[in-house]
Image (cartoon, grey):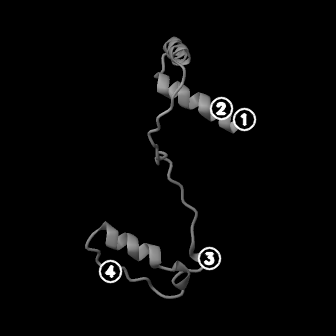
Amino acid sequence: MKKPLKLPKFKNEDEEREFWYNLDLSNYYEASDMERVSFPNLKPTTRSISIRIPEYLLNRVKEKANETNIPYQSLIKEYIKKGVLST
C-alpha cells in the first residue's frame, strides 16, 4: 500500500460518484494489494426492450412455453441466449 486513502463524508450519491470517477487508485494501492472476490448472489442487470415479431411466432412461443411450464418471456430470453452464444 502506498498511502492510506481517506474517504470524505458525501452529501449525496452524485458527490460520491464524482469522487470515485476522478480518483486514481494507483496512487493508493499496488497490484499486490488486490484480492480476487466473487459475488455469487449478484444478479445481472436487465433492461426492458420492445421488439416486433409476427403474431403467429409469438403464439407459437407461448404454446411452447406453456408445454414446458415456463413464462414465455423467459423462453424468448433462452432462445436469444442460445443463438448468441452458438455463434
Q: Which residue is mark 1?
A: 86
Which residue is drawn at the image coordinates 33% and 69% (left, top)? Answer: 14
What amino acid type should be assigned to the residue bearing mark 2? Lys
Ranked by sequence position, the earlier of labels 3 and 1 is 3
Q: Which residue is mark 3?
A: 32
Q: Which residue is mark 2?
A: 82
Image location of residue 9, percent across then percent down = 28, 77
Q: Which residue is mark 4?
A: 8
Tell me the quadrant of the picture where the C terminus can be found.
top right
- Foreground: 53 or 46? 53
Q: CA distance from mark 3 to mark 2?
A: 39 Å
64 to the left or right of 6: right
Q: CA distance from mark 3 to mark 4?
A: 25 Å
Ranked by sequence position, the earlier of labels 1 and 4 is 4
Question: Mark 1 and mark 2 in contact (Cβ < 8 Å)?
Answer: yes
Label 3 packing within 10 angstroms: few (<14), some (14-19), many (20+): few
What amino acid type should be assigned to the residue bearing mark 1? Ser
- SS at mark 1 in the image: loop
- Foreground: 14 or 55? 55
Tell me the quadrant of the picture where the N terminus can be found.
bottom right
Mark 1 against mark 4, which lies toward the viewer? 1
Q: CA distance from mark 4 to mark 2?
A: 46 Å
What amino acid type should be assigned to the residue bearing mark 3? Ser
- SS at mark 2 in the image: helix
Mark 3 against mark 1, which lies toward the viewer? 1
